[in-house]
Image: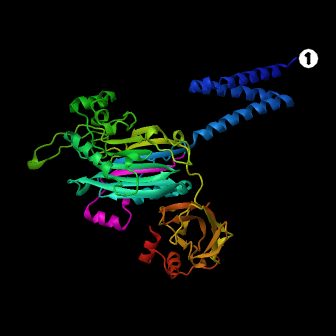
């Protein structure tokens, strides 16, 4: 038998090592980062040996088989791992201030990590003076407009929002996820003035995300050191009353519940000088055991399953405006007596609760019970000291959700037919899944790729009224040439289900060709478009109701 060359011997040794490493893959997986580092080193050795070999087909085949096995193992692990979903959550008491000039760091827009799939933004003390509030009822409030302006060019749409006086909850999501988010509902609960005033309380948005139930709850609880029991009572009331009387699970019955906001829990017992000295020396752990929320979580049964990241950042209240200095200003109370300076506290918090596996009912025809669970990993829990518009600092939590998708196909698949331009009528082809609860009020909207929310369409077509052909597999609807933007550009199509109150299908972006016909100068293009649509919801309130948005 011919002796092996140095390169062949080295490769044989490397392959033998690879074989042995496969046999003990279980032990490698348990060694954590050191095991991964060792595996990377061995792969690098293998690649170096492959580079040294010129033309040995048998060895090449063995290397390919080894790599194929590795890819099969990786693919199986990825399949078992399920869907990964990145969520960035913000809570901020903005103290009636206007939006800041920049929120790049707050939203981690320059992050080199994985793309964020969803932004959840909970604000407290949004300006709710009567003139501002009435204006915001008729139009989007300044904070909503601000975040839409920032996020829509990046491919995010405002999925849902709910407002109760100064409490505002906004949810933005990437376009690609829209068909897999269903059953969206909002609710609010007042707890101020014995439930008659909405300066305190909670607002919620719940949804089904890839078939899993998730609820987001933004709260503003009573202030002051002595009101711990009132805070706990109010939170219990909010949990009981959210979605009460509706055919929707209570917040605690969702698979995943996020609870956040200005929860107003304080640091008990210790004096202001000890607290500030501990903060200055970054000895935050000395204060944790006297944090009222931490103490309540140990004692109150309904809080025990809520989790929170470590408080490794400075308490976020109370600061002088436009500074990182805690409360130094003289405050005048009744009859001009000076009030005490406020003791720093972690008032602004983000917690979450995953429903116990034993509580999650297994649904017939779906995955086994153990696979229905959502896994939550907190990647980052920080405050943002550079923002000084209020006496609170914003807090953000970045999460990775892992779940087995229970919904993996959109209810509607749609696309534009042929080349689109304002020179001729255009066609849309779509096919719907049998389980789509279709309605005569369903519609398909034409949107710019940077659209802000579901009402931000250019034009639309009723799926029944504007249908021109139908077969077993698909249907076609038309849009009039007069409604197509004459300037052209990049657009997409969305199918809105009236019964589900959500977008259930979205097309790939496509180009509309610019019109060769000059646009009439006396009528702006957008006016020319909607004037030719007799039942356009912008000009007909009944049609707005018909569309259900």
Number of numbered markers: 1
The percent coordinates of residue 401 (x first, y second) are: 50, 42
The span shown in magenta is 115-143
The percent coordinates of residue 501 (x first, y second) are: 47, 63
For label 1, count other residues whose C-alpha is less than 10 Å away and answer few (under 14), some (14-19) or many (20+).
few
Residue occupying image coordinates x 31% and y 32%: 298
Q: Residue furthest left?
A: 335
Q: Is residue 425 above or below residue 131?
A: below
Q: Is residue 28 above or below residue 506?
A: above
Which quadrant is the N terminus positioned in? top right
Q: Is residue 330 left or right of residue 426?
A: left
Which quadrant is the C terminus positioned in? bottom left
Name the residue beneath numbered marker 1: 1
The quadrant where residue 44 appears: top right
Q: Is residue 389 visible?
A: no
Q: Is residue 60 visible?
A: yes
The quadrant where residue 166 appears: bottom left
Q: Is residue 274 left or right of residue 410?
A: left
Q: How is the image coloured?
A: rainbow
């Amino acid at each position: 038998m011919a002796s092996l060359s140095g390169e062949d011997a080295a490769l044989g040794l490397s392959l033998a090592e690879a074989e042995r490493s496969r046999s003990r893959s279980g032990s490698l997986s348990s060694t954590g980062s050191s095991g991964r580092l060792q595996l990377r080193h061995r792969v690098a050795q293998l690649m170096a040996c492959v580079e040294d070999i010129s033309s040995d087909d048998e060895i090449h085949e063995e290397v390919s088989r080894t790599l194929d096995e590795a890819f099969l193992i990786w693919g199986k692990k990825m399949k078992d791992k399920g869907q990964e979903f990145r969520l960035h959550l913000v809570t901020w008491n903005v103290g009636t201030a206007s939006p800041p000039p920049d929120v790049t760091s707050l939203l981690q827009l320059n992050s080199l990590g994985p793309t964020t799939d969803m932004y959840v933004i909970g604000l407290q003390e949004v300006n709710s003076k009567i003139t501002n509030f009435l204006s915001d009822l008729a139009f989007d409030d300044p904070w909503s407009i601000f975040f839409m302006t920032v996020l829509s060019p990046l491919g995010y749409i405002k999925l849902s929002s709910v407002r109760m006086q100064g409490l505002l909850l906004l949810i933005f999501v990437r376009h690609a996820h829209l068909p897999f988010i269903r059953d969206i509902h909002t609710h609010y609960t007042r707890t101020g003035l014995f439930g008659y005033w909405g300066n305190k309380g909670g607002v919620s948005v719940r949804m089904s995300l890839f078939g899993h139930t998730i609820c987001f709850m933004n709260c503003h609880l009573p202030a002051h050191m002595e009101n711990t029991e009132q805070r706990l009572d109010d939170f219990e009331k909010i949990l009981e009353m959210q979605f009460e009387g509706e055919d929707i699970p209570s917040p605690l019955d969702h698979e995943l519940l996020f609870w956040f906001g200005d929860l107003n829990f304080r640091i008990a017992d210790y004096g202001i000088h000890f607290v500030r000295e501990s903060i200055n020396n970054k000895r935050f752990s000395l204060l944790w055991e006297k944090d009222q929320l931490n103490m309540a979580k140990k004692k109150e049964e309904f809080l025990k399953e809520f989790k929170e990241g470590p408080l490794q950042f400075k308490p976020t209240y109370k600061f002088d405006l436009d500074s990182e200095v805690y409360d130094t200003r003289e405050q005048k109370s009744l009859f001009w007596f000076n009030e005490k300076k406020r003791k720093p506290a972690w008032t602004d918090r983000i917690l979450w609760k995953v429903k116990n596996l034993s509580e999650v009912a297994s649904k017939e025809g779906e995955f086994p019970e153990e696979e229905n669970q959502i896994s939550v990993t907190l990647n980052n829990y920080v405050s943002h000291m550079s923002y000084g518009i209020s006496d609170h600092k914003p807090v953000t939590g970045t999460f990775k959700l892992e779940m087995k998708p229970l919904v993996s196909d959109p209810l509607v698949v749609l696309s534009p037919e042929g080349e689109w331009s304002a020179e001729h009528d255009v066609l849309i082809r779509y096919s719907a899944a049998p389980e789509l609860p279709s309605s005569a009020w369903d519609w398909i909207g034409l949107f710019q790729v940077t659209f802000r929310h579901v009402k931000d369409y250019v034009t639309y077509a009723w799926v029944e009224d504007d249908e021109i052909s139908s077969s077993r597999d698909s249907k076609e609807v038309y849009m009039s040439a007069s409604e197509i933007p004459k300037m052209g550009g990049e657009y997409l199509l969305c199918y809105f289900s009236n019964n589900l109150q959500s977008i259930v299908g979205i097309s790939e972006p496509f180009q509309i060709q610019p019109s060769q016909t000059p646009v009439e100068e006396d009528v702006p293009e957008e006016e020319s478009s909607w004037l030719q649509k007799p039942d356009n919801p912008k000009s007909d309130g009944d049609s707005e109701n018909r569309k259900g948005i």
